Amino acid sequence: MPEDPPPSPPPKPPAAPRRDSGGAVVAERKAARVKPPSLYQVVLLNDDYTPMEFVVMVLQRYFQRDADSATHIMLKIHHEGRGICGVYPKDVAATKVELVITAARREGHPLQCIMEAA
């Protein structure tokens, strides 16, 4: 019959707070390590119905692209089927996706906008 593993040592009690010569408690500050937020790509997908001008307008309005950059991305979407509009933290990316889809539906376009982990 196998032997039971030895018991783990009891947890150490918290260290007593340091005190200076006057008896006041000295607080020690530890550097907080904050993980940067995960980033997501906002992607527009090609369809055969949404006008190119509308896609350029979306890129300019919601992704702050100039006319040349927006046209370049629109042509990439048209020729390759998809184009990255920007890379953002999750909440910002989700908001941009909703704004684009809402604008497209309001104008009667089937434009698809998605987000993917970057």
Image (tube, rainbow, N blue to C red):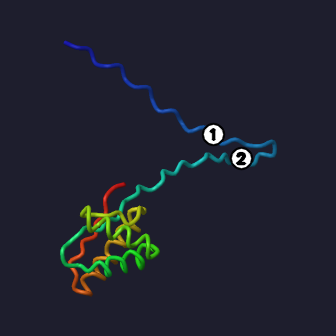
**Horizontal and vertical percent for residue 90?**
38, 62
Q: How many marks?
A: 2
Residue behind mark 2: 26
Mark 1 Cα shell of 10 Å, populated few (<14), some (14-19), many (≥20): few
Secondary structure of the residue carrying tag 1 is loop
Secondary structure of the residue carrying tag 2 is strand
Closest to the observer: 27 or 22?
Answer: 27
Q: Which of the 4 quarters of the picture holds residue 39?
A: bottom left
Identify which residue is drawn at 77% across, 45% down. 23
Is there CB contact under 8 Å for labels 2 and 1? no
Closest to the observer: 64 or 8?
Answer: 64
Marks 2/1: CA distance? 11 Å
**Residue kind at label 1, given as amino acid type:** Ala
Q: From what the image shows, is residue 93 above or below residue 67?
A: above
Closest to the observer: 105 or 31?
Answer: 105
**Horizontal and vertical percent for residue 94?**
34, 68
Identify which residue is drawn at 20% across, 78% down. 110
Q: Quadrant of the C terminus?
A: bottom left
**Horizontal and vertical percent for residue 89?**
42, 62
**Residue kind at label 2, given as amino acid type:** Val
Q: Earlier in the sequence, mark 2 or mark 1?
A: 1
Q: From what the image shows, is residue 12 above or below residue 87?
A: above
The image's mark for residue 110 is none
* Image side of residue 17 versus residue 70, left or right: right
Toward the right, the furthest residue is 22
Identify which residue is drawn at 32% across, 81% down. 53
Mark 2 Cα shell of 10 Å, populated few (<14), some (14-19), many (≥20): few
Identify which residue is drawn at 22% across, 85% down. 108
Residue behind mark 1: 16
Q: Which of the 4 quarters of the picture holds residue 59?
A: bottom left
In front of the other: label 2 or label 1?
2
